[in-house]
Amino acid sequence: MVSSNYFSQCLFEVAGSHTGATKVAFVFLDRGEREATRWTAADLLRRASSIGRHLLDAGLRGRPVLLAHPPGADFVAAICGCLIAQAIAVPVPDLSSPRLGARVAGIVGVVRPAAILCTAVQALSPELAAISDAPKIATDTIADVDIEPGALPPIDLAIPAFLQFTSGSTSAPRGVVVGQDNLAANLAMIRRAFRIGTDISVTWLPPYHDMGLVGGLLAPLAFGVPAIAMSPLAFMQKPERWLRAIAQYRATIAGGPDFAYALCATRASETRLAGLDLSSWRLAFCGAEPVRSGTLNRFGQTFAPAGFRRTSFFPCYGLAEATLLATGDWVAHGRNLETVDCGGGQGDQVLRIVDPATGLPVADGASGEIWLAGSHIARGYWNDPDASAAVFGATIATESEHRFFRTGDVGALRDGRLTVSGRLKHILIVRGAKHHAEDLEISVAACHPTLAGGATAAFPVDIGDGEQVVILQELGMRVTDTALLATIRTEIVRTLSEAHGLRATDIVLVARWSLPRTSSGKVVRDRCRDAWLAGTLAR
């Protein structure tokens, strides 16, 4: 037992510093442009402590509570309040998005929350009532109170910090149990890896996703770094809002998945770039999905006139089961990138590349499954002991002191630096030859300019003559010219043949944003395959 958990201790220290009452801790931009909330560290602690006190009085310490707030100040105060009170926070997507209702209902079925934290408006909504009959607590109506660290109960490390539900890109979403110790270890890793100092961050990332929750919110708040936030929708509607906020607040840290950089580069124009100054941006992290050299090159070239430096790119590898960060580093140079590695590990992490068939490490430079161990690795999956034992309890005969988490990702270590190539489940075997789905998707997406910014899905189908490949490709822009569509298909056929020796059994061109995605924006190949088999794709 210790007197206080790490995150709460950080909040109290930042708020109690000589600048705690004046230094900005959190700003939320309505529609990505206008300040709707501006909190100092003292303001944030007062709101979080008030909610924490209420949760303690309600007997919710050690019990799961759903966080249903939309992105914004109410969510931030609620997650911090849960961490102070040691209520087990379960962040979920904003129910104002109808397509996410089924996902939230599934999470509720797994967790069976003791309460749902929301706003007063949400508490009256039929959408929330349909999800669960658990008591609703409108956190925006809780009166402010002052609370001292000594008034909090001592931390019980058996109580998880929060449940982070995975994106479900390869399986049904699972609740990753992140402990207080896991969170503390990963925040320390992020602090060292990012070389946190006098920084400012800007985020649009979903707060219910590990990158948005830990990297976009909890890390800056714990380190006393001002966190400027907007909703994911504000970014998706106008990606330049993110860039404008970076320029306006002179942000030093900001990042997102590969698709975010591709979207910014695709939407860029001289008008939108006018007056944009990105010279303050020292760390542009990129992760959550495969990091593509073509995307980084295009973004770097597009925004160099605005002062962006390619050496600011920080490719990284992480996942909810590692709390967030596993590896990451700045790119080594500013020239065009031919390949992208995600750097080396941090802290006490042990990283091995293992042959999944033998369970033994492979030679340096060889591909295998990425296995991780360390104090940042989560405890397992909520109420799923079988999956937890299978995935979090792997051992290597020569390293019996470690229990490894099997990531299911394929990668290679060269001189201690990790390159991620795909998922074990996303290896296609056609006529005896193995192909990574990601490799096919990268080649296809780059073969014609009209595809820039559109997602790609490559997957196998068995139509009676062994595995065949199907390609689904979103168009980056509206195309109605049938001759141009035919040209695009021809280019995809040529690319697959010349680069991979493959011929797809079907190539489907669809509108942008029409492929099935997870809540964090990843294309879900299994659902793409199901839609193709069912013939429900709009061609």
Image (cartoon, rainbow, N blue to C red):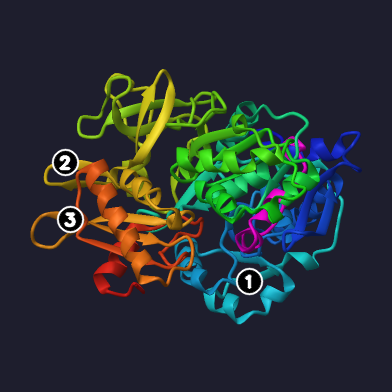
Q: Where is residue 513 in the image (x, y as percent from the top left)?
A: 47, 65
- When the figure is inspected, residue 448 is found, relative to residue 307, above or below; the finding is below
**Could you say whether the residue bearing mark 1 is in a helix, strand or loop?**
loop
The residue to which callout 3 is attached is 468
Separation of marks 2 and 3 at Cα, in angstroms: 12 Å
- When the figure is inspected, residue 521 is found, relative to residue 495, above or below; the finding is below
Q: Which residue extends farthest bottom?
A: 126
**Could you say whether the residue bearing mark 3 is in a helix, strand or loop?**
strand
The residue to which callout 1 is attached is 135
237 inside magenta stretch:
yes
Residue type pointed to by label 3 = Gln
The residue to which callout 2 is attached is 433
Q: Where is residue 481 in the image (x, y as percent from the top left)?
A: 40, 71
Dot 1 or dot 2: first in sequence order is 1
Q: Which residue extends farthest left?
A: 465
Dot 3 or dot 1: first in sequence order is 1
For the C terminus, give its image quadrant: bottom left
Q: Position of residue 296 (x, y in %)?
A: 52, 39
Task: Answer yes or no: is residue 505 visible.
Answer: yes
Name the foreground residue: 238 vs 158: 238
From which residue to which does the magenta span run?
Answer: 221-243
Name the foreground residue: 26 vs 12: 26
